[in-house]
Image: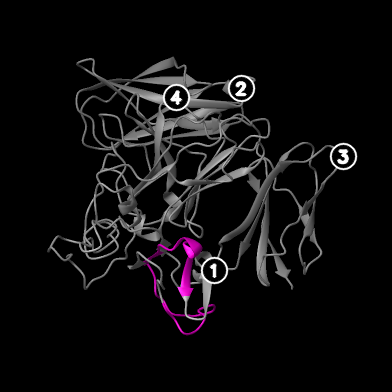
């Protein structure tokens, strides 16, 4: 932790660090002077903090006020929301097994995420609301939410919507999401999100490597959201995780009235019969559902329920439960011809009912009522490019197109979403003069189907 509460250098270095191969990481930097409060200063020049995070050099470091108790007492003030800039953002060490007060410090991913600095603690107040960029919602664009120079979330707003100035997203770093059943894999972070004014085209939340928790494989992580009204967590089978960018994305995100928390998990941690899995698949015009219980005790039956808006539910059928079992028990159900309806989305859940009449809802399985679409073919030119390039994309008729430019480490440099007109299959990506010279990759996603990335070279 390198913080200056007055004017001065947060980290004095005699040479520029661009290209430095050192592995200094998981630090917090801060300087208070208003003229350069967004920079880390070097002797001879002030360098923007984002430029300072290059490669492995401070990749996971942050720039934010640390939330000390006072200038003379450097223990974290748990009642200061700024202390969240320290919580769960440190790295694991086999040497530092306790903090300065002899409190145990997490030594591996399973045990948790350590805090930056000499103290292990948990803030007692809400995290600060992440800064929205841009600060107003513009239909057809993606809004980023930033805290302590880390990206918390990105929301792609539908083209037709322009309304509220922003929404308040809060990142709970280093903490297990409330209500998670530790029988299933879980992560050490979650994002608080109010009811969104409209269901966005997609919503992405971001995590750090030291928040992976009990997940041995990041490919198994699914987008998971909680309903504060019922208390259950609903994993989204249509979500995807990018282990390179540490992003968990949910296309066609549904903004339910009570959906307040989001995290990553491998299964919805609910149902009294210890549900091991609940999955669905579109098979021609039918929806095939399969679920497996790990144990059952006094279980009576399962109600298979369906919804077309994830709000109003109807019971399709009742499946008799095994009753009492310590072995795996599998069940299946087919919802015939459901994909002949005009609805774009269909949702399923289980109502597990015990012999005494008590019941618990499972997580929600979300299936899309649309045929699989082939990845779009595209051509990019000129290559190399200077300040802009053009994409020629085949077979686009008012489809929604998302273009993403990443560097060789997988870091997102630029992204844009828009709807192409019927009489044009070309997209011009401009305003790239400030992008540094180097090798980049451009990828195109049409209606949620991503095409293989192509290499681009940026010159002068």
Quadrant of the image occupied by residue 93: bottom left
CB under 8 Å between discs 2 and 4 = no
Which residue matches tag 1?
51
Which residue matches tag 3?
423
Residue at 43% over, 63% down: 33
Give the color scheme: rainbow, by chain, secondary structure or one colour. Answer: one colour
The kind of secondary structure element at disc 2 is: loop
Above or below for 10 versus 232? below
- Give the magenta range: 12-41
3D distance between C-alphas at marks 2 and 3: 28 Å
Quadrant of the image occupied by residue 298: top left
Give residue 265's position: percent from left, percent from top: 38, 44
Instruction: Judge depth for marks 3 and 4 and give the one in front.
Output: 4
3D distance between C-alphas at marks 2 and 1: 47 Å
- In this view, the residue in front, 457 or 376, is 457
Which residue matches tag 4?
257
| Precedes in sequence: disc 3 or disc 4 | 4
Instruction: Judge depth for marks 2 and 3 and give the one in front.
Output: 3
The kind of secondary structure element at disc 1 is: helix
| Precedes in sequence: disc 3 or disc 1 | 1
3D distance between C-alphas at marks 4 and 1: 40 Å
| Precedes in sequence: disc 4 or disc 1 | 1
């Amino acid at each position: 932790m390198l913080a200056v509460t007055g004017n001065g250098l947060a980290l004095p270095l005699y040479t520029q660090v661009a290209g430095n191969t050192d592995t200094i990481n998981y630090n917090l930097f801060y300087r208070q002077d208003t003229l350069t409060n967004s920079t880390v200063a070097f002797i001879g020049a002030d360098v923007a903090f984002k430029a300072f995070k290059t490669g492995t050099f401070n990749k996971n470091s942050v720039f934010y006020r640390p939330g000390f108790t006072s200038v003379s007492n450097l223990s974290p003030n748990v009642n200061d929301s700024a202390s969240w800039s320290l919580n769960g953002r440190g790295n694991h060490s086999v040497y530092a097994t306790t903090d300065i007060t002899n409190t145990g410090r997490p030594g591996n991913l399973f045990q948790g995420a350590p805090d930056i600095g000499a103290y292990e603690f948990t803030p007692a107040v809400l995290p600060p609301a992440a800064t929205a960029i841009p600060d107003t919602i513009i239909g057809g664009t993606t809004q980023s939410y930033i805290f302590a120079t880390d990206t918390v979330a990105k929301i792609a707003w539908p083209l037709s919507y322009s309304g509220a100035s922003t929404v308040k997203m809060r990142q709970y770093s280093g903490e297990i999401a409330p209500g998670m059943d530790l029988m299933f894999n879980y992560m050490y972070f979650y994002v608080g999100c109010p009811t969104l004014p409209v269901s966005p085209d997609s919503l992405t939340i971001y995590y750090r490597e030291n928040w992976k928790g009990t997940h041995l494989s990041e490919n198994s992580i699914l987008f998971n959201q909680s309903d504060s009204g019922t208390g259950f967590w609903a994993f989204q089978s249509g979500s995807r995780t990018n282990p390179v960018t540490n992003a968990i994305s949910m296309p066609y995100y549904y903004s339910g009235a009570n959906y307040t928390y989001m995290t990553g998990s491998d299964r919805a941690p609910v149902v009294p019969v210890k549900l091991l899995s609940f999955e669905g698949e579109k098979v021609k015009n039918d929806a095939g559902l399969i679920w497996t219980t790990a144990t059952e005790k006094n279980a009576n039956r399962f109600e298979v329920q369906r919804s077309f808006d994830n709000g109003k539910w109807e019971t399709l059928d009742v499946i008799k439960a095994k009753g009492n079992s310590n072995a795996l028990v599998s069940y299946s159900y087919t919802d015939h011809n459901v994909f002949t309806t005009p609805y774009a989305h269909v949702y399923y859940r289980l109502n597990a009912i015990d012999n005494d009449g008590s019941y618990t809802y499972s997580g929600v399985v979300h299936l899309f009522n649309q045929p699989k679409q082939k990845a779009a073919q595209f051509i990019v030119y000129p290559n190399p490019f200077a300040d802009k390039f053009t994409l020629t994309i085949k077979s686009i008729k008012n489809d929604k197109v998302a273009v993403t430019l990443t560097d060789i480490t997988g870091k997102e440099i630029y992204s844009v979403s828009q709807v192409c007109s019927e009489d044009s299959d070309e997209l011009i990506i401009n305003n790239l003069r400030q992008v540094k010279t180097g090798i980049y990759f451009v990828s195109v996603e049409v209606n949620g189907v991503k095409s293989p990335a192509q290499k681009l070279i940026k010159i002068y």
